[in-house]
Image (tube, grey):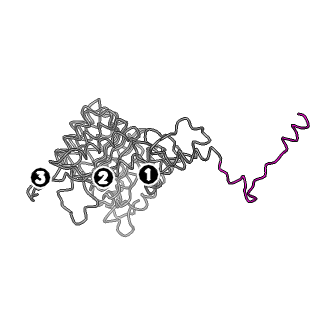
Amino acid sequence: MSGKERRLAQRRILAEDPEWNLSPVPKLSDLCIKAIVTNFEKRPIINGIPSKHRERVLSSISTELPLTIVTPLIPEQLYWKRRAVANFKNCDPKQHGGSWKQLFCELHLQTIIESYSPKKGRGSDEWDVFLATVRLLSPCINKLVIKQLRPTEPAEGTVVKATDPPPDHLDLQTMVSSLPQLRDLSIYYGIRDCNIDFNWSFFGMTLNDCVLLTNVLKANNTLTSLRIQSSSVDDDRCRLISNALLTNKALKTLDLSHNKIGDSGARALAKVLSVQTTVLADLNLSNNKVGRQGAYCLGKALATNKTLQHLRLRMNYIGDTGGAQLCGELRKNDTLVSVDLCGNNLGAETVRALCALLEKNGRQLASLDLSCNKLGLFPSATTIFAASAAPAVASAAAAGTSAPGNFGDDAKKEVDTAGKALFEAISQNKYVTFFDIRVTDLSQEYSVAIQGIIAENMQAL
């Protein structure tokens, strides 16, 4: 570089305004980003933007943009996290596949479904808009927890009578068919925010609702988990659902807890467990009306079933005989991992069958819940455990001598024959790691000893 060129390069341009400064002048890239953000709804541009500027755009565009624009265009989690936090409380992406986009889409669709009121005898414009939204969000919908379903509104001018049948709810068949990625569905047929418009007819699954649901189960091969709780599902509806499950090869979890299912419904579900094509692995019938006959049928089915791993029958009406029959049949099963029989009025017969099950039990069955049953402290003259070590306890009590499991001065009246039998049975089992025997009238001595065996089994894992 010549001397003249060097002098020209060192020249400075002085502004006419002495207060002028170069630093406030925005960069061209900043001006472009601002223009993209301001006009994003009219001209949504995201592809082609350099990665170092793309993040700035996603952190600046509005979280109220129409979903028709951003859903197919933006996959980045940064934007969807902002949008989810702005619209919902207690956001936990772990409950939605670890994806903020999936979280937003599932919670947004849940909100739409819970607020949607089907209309009878009116135009289908609202239904078309609803289905369009479902289809738009469908690629991101894997799990739906519907906490309320509004009943169908009567046609305009119709007078609703007290004798009219309960109104139906949302057409699940059409909706679920528009969600090919749906795996987990939880539904409550009722209203949580009815306020002064409360009406008993708004609550419970109608037969038409059940038919639509069974059509879903017959045609769907992606849904793996279905929960219908507190929705007045009775034997008739349970039989319809069971009939659909006879041909279903996808559903692994079925939760029908807190309903009105009795022995007839349990027999229908037992038939499902008996077919070789079933893949059902978790069955929850807690807080229903299943009795001795239903428990017997479920036990017979489980004697040959090779898929079910978790059976929950807590708070039913199985009774002591039903519990004994169920445990007797479970001796032939080698796939169950957990069994819950809490609060079923079980007693001495069940304990005897359970002891035989524990002594035979293999590696699979690891969890048993017998809490809230009257298992222990039977009269000393009982012979229910004549085939086990109980006669020694009974004879000792009859002779008026001290025996394990009694309560001091009450030894002549009551002895814990059940506690002794369960302790000796569980001592021969190295695989049970959870055994809930709270509120079962077992003596503290044997309760502590049994839990000690369970603790040893857990440490041996």
Q: Position of residue 164 (x, y in %)?
A: 9, 54
Question: Which residue corresponds to mark 2?
Answer: 114
Q: CA distance from mark 2 to mark 1?
A: 21 Å
153 displayed left or right of 29:
left
Indicate whether 424 appears above or below 396. Answer: above
The crowd level at tag 2 (other Cα within 10 Å; few <14, some 14-19, many 20+) is some
Q: Quadrant of the N terminus?
A: top right
Camera sees residue 349: yes
Q: Position of residue 40 (x, y in %)?
A: 48, 45
Question: Which residue corresponds to mark 1?
Answer: 64
Question: Could you tell which of marks 1 and 3 lies nearer the N-terminus?
Answer: 1
Question: Could you tell which of marks 2 and 1 lies nearer the N-terminus?
Answer: 1
Question: Which residue corresponds to mark 3?
Answer: 165
Label 3, secondary structure: give it.
Answer: loop
The crowd level at tag 1 (other Cα within 10 Å; few <14, some 14-19, many 20+) is few
Q: Main secondary structure of the magenta part?
A: loop
What's the residue type where badge 2 is placed?
A: Glu
Q: CA distance from mark 1 to mark 3?
A: 41 Å
